[in-house]
Image (cartoon, rainbow, N blue to C red):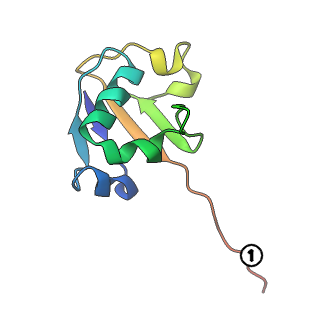
Amino acid sequence: MNIHIPTPLRAYTGGLETVSVTGTTVSGVFQQLTVQYPELKPHLFTPEGKLRSFVNVYLNDDDIRYLPNKEETAANDSDELTIIPSIAGGTNCRL
């Protein structure tokens, strides 16, 4: 399966925009991803092993938060996983 890595996390994949990982579920794919690229783990998961709330993950075009089995959703080699970190911020601009 191809996993699309967002720009802020590419430093942990040797600059790769897309990496290939095998797994039968989304969580299995993430397990393999963090074995291949261990520096990604703290950026994607809490110390308790839960996917961080600000990390959005899409299996093909579906947000996994809304899939019935969430991270346990079946995955195959032809699927694509996209990681999109939430971005917060802004400025209090007074004119």
Q: Residues within 10 Å of mark 1 (few under 14, many from 20)?
A: few
Which of 16 and 14 lies nearest the eye of the viewer?
14
Q: Position of residue 5 (x, y in %)?
A: 33, 46
Dot 1: what SS? loop
Q: Identify the residue shown where x is 23% and y is 39%.
A: 19
Q: Is residue 54 left or right of residue 61?
A: right
- For this orientation, the residue located farthest to the bottom is 95
- How many marks do you count on the picture? 1
Residue indicated by mark 1 = 92
Q: Position of residue 4 (x, y in %)?
A: 31, 41
Task: Please state, as top left, top right, bottom left or bottom right, where the C terminus lies in the image.
Answer: bottom right
In the rendered structure, the answer to whether residue 66 lies left or right of residue 37 reads right
Query: At 23% from the left edge and 56% from the top edge, which residue is drawn?
Result: 15
Q: Amino acid at mark 1?
A: Asn
On the image, which quarter does residue 67 sit in?
top right
* Residue 90 drawn at (x, y percent): 65, 69
Please name whichever residue, 39 or 82, is drawn nearer the observer in this view of the structure: 39
The part of the image, by quadrant, that contains residue 7 is bottom left
Q: Quadrant of the N terminus?
A: top left
10 vs 57: above or below: below
| Image side of residue 75 versus residue 47, left or right | left
Q: Residue at x 28, y 34 (%)?
A: 35
Q: Is residue 9 left or right of residue 44?
A: left
Q: Position of residue 87 (x, y in %)?
A: 56, 56
Task: Determine the residue located farthest toward the right in the rendered image.
Answer: 94
Image point (46%, 35%), residue name:
57
